[in-house]
Amino acid sequence: MSNQTNGKRDGTEDGIDDGTGSTTATLGRLEEGSGRACCAGSVIDDRRPDPEAVASEEAVFKALANEKRLAVVHALRDGELCACDLEAVLDAPQSTVATHLRKLRDAGIVRTRKDGKWTHYRIADTASLQLIDLAAALGGES
Amino acid sequence: MSNQTNGKRDGTEDGIDDGTGSTTATLGRLEEGSGRACCAGSVIDDRRPDPEAVASEEAVFKALANEKRLAVVHALRDGELCACDLEAVLDAPQSTVATHLRKLRDAGIVRTRKDGKWTHYRIADTASLQLIDLAAALGGES
DNA sequence: CATACATATTGAGAAAACCCGATTTAACTT
DNA sequence: AAGTTAAATCGGGTTTTCTCAATATGTATG
């Protein structure tokens, strides 16, 4: 399901050879001397992404690229929980849990509410739940 | 924008104290002796997520939790590119690029097409692009 | 104010991820 | 077959992240 805008050309598809190699390359460009080359073009400059955008995406992905932190987000799906509850969910020492929670907070994934001596955590934005759902869909199809 | 299903109660919102701590906790449960407790309940078991689901999500997030690999995915947004093109995009040594590409491939984010002596990479599923867009939205609001 | 409890922070050892030169594999060219 | 080019893999040193005991902070309660 879901094919790309990539106009697929000749060549083998992930290792399966269909022996019809003949069309002129569009993405690759021809060269002077012998044979052709696929690259060495300056198409590249256009394709180089905005570093700032990449950095901010990277921060989000890093925050979620961890078993324990993902478990936290899952646990918070249907409502907030206090730190000690999350400690039980993760079954890890207090300092470990606190560290993960801080990372999620720093990344803007969760928000806190202080109630007396304890702290409740909740999902900051439903978008992070969508994000996880998408990842699950992507992960469970390979 | 976008509030959760979390019924917010008394307490302070992310550090701003409004000194009205008095209502009975709903998520927390009362205890025998002195004072109340928020946790120590077995609500926890229900909240513990499926380890397999978490693992597969983690794999996807790990694959994208890297500047270079994100740059690759961005570069492939509007069509496939060969490995040497991506080498130019990333401006990194060949072996480094090849390693990143393998990780993306292992994670099912990209697919390859072999054309003679060179290899073209493309996005495997548009869902990964949506994923990145969502991450960008999440990252750019904190 | 001493004590108990919940959470946060720190620091250091262990593990994982990253980087990249060197080598290997594979496919084309002559 | 020898030479060339593209790409993948290997080996290791470097950097980052993870983990968690110890300690600190902050808040209630006797």
Image: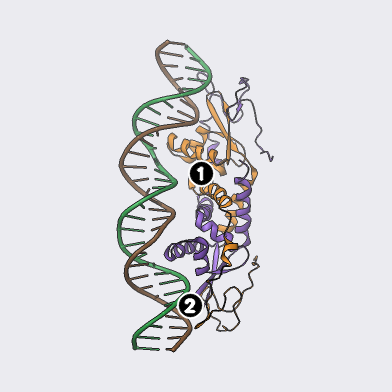
Chain colours: A orange, B purple, C brown, D green
Name the amino acid type tagged 1.
Arg
Residue found at the far right of this picture: B1
Query: Callout 1: few (<14), some (14-19), or many (20+) C-alpha neighbours within 10 Å?
Result: many
Residue A59 is situated, as x and y percent measured from the top left of the image, at 53, 47
Instruction: Name the disc covering residue B117, or none.
Output: 2
Q: What is the quadrant of the C terminus of chain B in the image? A: top right
Residue A90 is situated, as x and y percent measured from the top left of the image, at 48, 40
Residue B30 is situated, as x and y percent measured from the top left of the image, at 56, 24
Instruction: Name the disc covering residue B36, or none.
Output: none
To which quarter of the image does residue A105 belong?
top right
In the image, is C12 to the left or to the right of B49?
left
Name the amino acid type tagged 2.
Lys
For the point 64% across and 46% down, which residue is it?
A: A127
For the point 63% across and 65% down, which residue is it?
A: B78
Q: From the viewer's perspective, is residue A18 above or below residue A6?
A: below
| Residues tagged 1 and 2 counted as in contact (Cβ below 8 A) | no
Instruction: Name the disc covering residue A69, or none.
Output: 1
Q: Chain of mark 2?
A: B
The total number of labels drawn is 2
Q: Which is nearer the eye, C3 or C15? A: C15
How far apart are labels 1 and 2 at the CA level?
Answer: 42 Å
Q: At numbered mark 1, what does the secondary structure look like: helix, strand or loop?
A: helix
Query: Callout 2: few (<14), some (14-19), or many (20+) C-alpha neighbours within 10 Å?
Result: few
To which quarter of the image does residue B79 belong?
bottom right
Q: What is the quadrant of the N terminus of chain B in the image? A: top right
Q: At numbered mark 2, what does the secondary structure look like: helix, strand or loop?
A: loop
Q: Chain of mark 1?
A: A
